[in-house]
Image (cartoon, grey):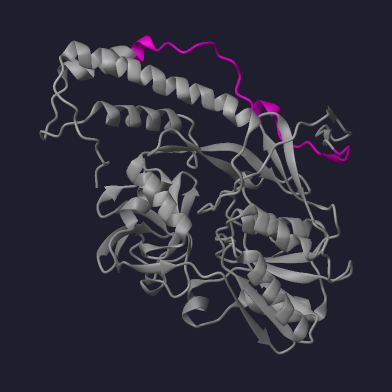
Amino acid sequence: MGLTRPPRSGIISDMQKSRAASVFFILVFGAVAFIGGFFAGYHRGPELERVTGLFNIETPEFASSTPDASGLGTCTDEKGIDVPCILDRDGVSAKDEGPADFSQFWKSWNVINERYVPPKSKTVTNQEKVWGAIQGLAGSLGDPYTFFLPPQEKSLFEEDVSGAFGGVGMQIGMKDGMLTVIAPLKDSPAERAGILQGDKVLLVDGATTSEMTLDKALYLIRGKIGTPVTLTLWRDGRAEPNEPFEVTVVREEIRVPTIDTEQKGDVFIIRLYGFPATGAELFRGALREFVQSGTDKLVLDLRGNPGGYLEIAVDMASWFLPQGKIVVSEEGKKGVGQVYRSRGYNVFGDKFHFVILVDGGSASAAEILAGALAQHGVATLVGQKTFGKGSVQELVPISDTASLKLTIARWVTPDGTNLSEGGLDPDVPVEITKEDVEKGEDPQLEKAIEIVRKGEWGD
């Protein structure tokens, strides 16, 4: 499971090794420094994000920022429209602490090259040391969504974007510093093995996850179709003995589902499992089914939905919001950046109201869509508190084979909620227990149907 190593290019002296490595590393850090300027003027465009994260298109400058009576402030965008300026600037822009002392790094580098003896005769190349140093640099930020992707892990990320892979079929993310199951996918090996939303993944085939990046954990969990992987899990409230337990799951080809529909009497239900590139067209088709059903009662189920493309979430919100209504705002190092607004399809009119189901597996784009529609008074949220994934990542090429995945902004809902600070609270909280699942009961859906039939909306 080690990193892919480039071939050695000959034998040189220790002094030559040290000098060559020093020059190479200076070039690498020069490239990293250049990225800062790169971020300020350019964003790559939307990319598919696994858990949670979303990618933005551009960040226009804002003309002004004026405090309001609440002290939160109002920012004016480039179109002259006032938007909330919510977040503490000190929490976004790093303070200048002066230049770093790199002599400690170079001393460590030279001591390692001169004296280190691998305990198992494993040669570590200078290139691998550079990758490790960049991984440490990214890790020092304390952000689980910012990490360096050396070649093998970069290939994993690209495989994930393709939408099909060998794995167990569960979405994972970081929650309270622990690797956590956001949700097992429908009809997946993980679901059939009894893995539940909220389970903490402590070990993967005996390897501890406490210091792993998300991509490293995914790399270990995935593998050749038909092979087993053993997960050591912790589940809050599990029946005695309440201690870690093991689950062995056989990997299968995983294809992430997107959407399905169902009608229960006079209530139409749309279940949305993600926000892939094809999501806008699929959602349009589901809404067409809803209109043709002849009912005006709609439930949108976003439980266990880990997110995806930002643009798809904006497009979906546009079916229910007048043109220009804020869907989500981006906060970056320069303050409020891009503001994403409804495109104004609004085919159901200003008086249409429906219910959205959410839970701890609703993350990222799912939280953006739910937050926008609830906070503009279009939908009532029923279920449990959402996951709380509201940061923006950008995939920056470092070389032809390696990339840096970096958090560059965070998302703010129309009423100023920073999604990364705890997620969204439902208007109508409804718990669902293990016993409910085992009995095939769904009290959250039952409550949603009751509310939409009575027209008794949450505050």
Residue 372 location, quadrant: bottom right
Magenta span covers which residues?
A: 79-105
Give the answer, above or below, for where 152 lies relative to 360: above
Residue 77 location, quadrant: top right
Q: Which is more toward the observer, 42 or 217?
A: 42
Magenta stretch contains residue 82: yes
* Residue 444 appears anywhere in the view: yes
Query: How far from the left and from the top, in percent, is residue 295?
Result: 79, 84
Magenta span main SS: loop
Give the answer, above or below, for where 108 lies relative to 209: above
Q: Is residue 133 left or right of residue 12?
A: right
Q: Residue furthest bottom?
A: 265
Q: Is residue 272 left or right of residue 71?
A: left
- Residue occupying image coordinates x 46% and y 24%: 31
Q: Quick one: quadrant of the C terminus?
A: bottom right
Give the answer, above or below, for where 46 lies relative to 376: above
Give the answer, above or below, for where 56 lies relative to 14: below
Residue 393 location, quadrant: top right
Q: Is residue 64 left or right of residue 422?
A: right
- Residue occupying image coordinates x 73% and y 41%: 338
Query: How far from the left and from the top, in percent, is residue 48?
Result: 54, 53
- Residue occupying image coordinates x 38% and y 54%: 201
Magenta stretch contains residue 349: no
Query: How far from the left and from the top, in percent, is residue 189?
Result: 37, 71
- Residue occupying image coordinates x 50% and y 54%: 50
* Residue 181 appears anywhere in the view: no
Q: Which is more toward the observer, 431 or 149?
A: 149
Query: How far from the left and from the top, in percent, is residue 132?
Result: 33, 31
Q: Is residue 394 left or right of residue 188?
A: right
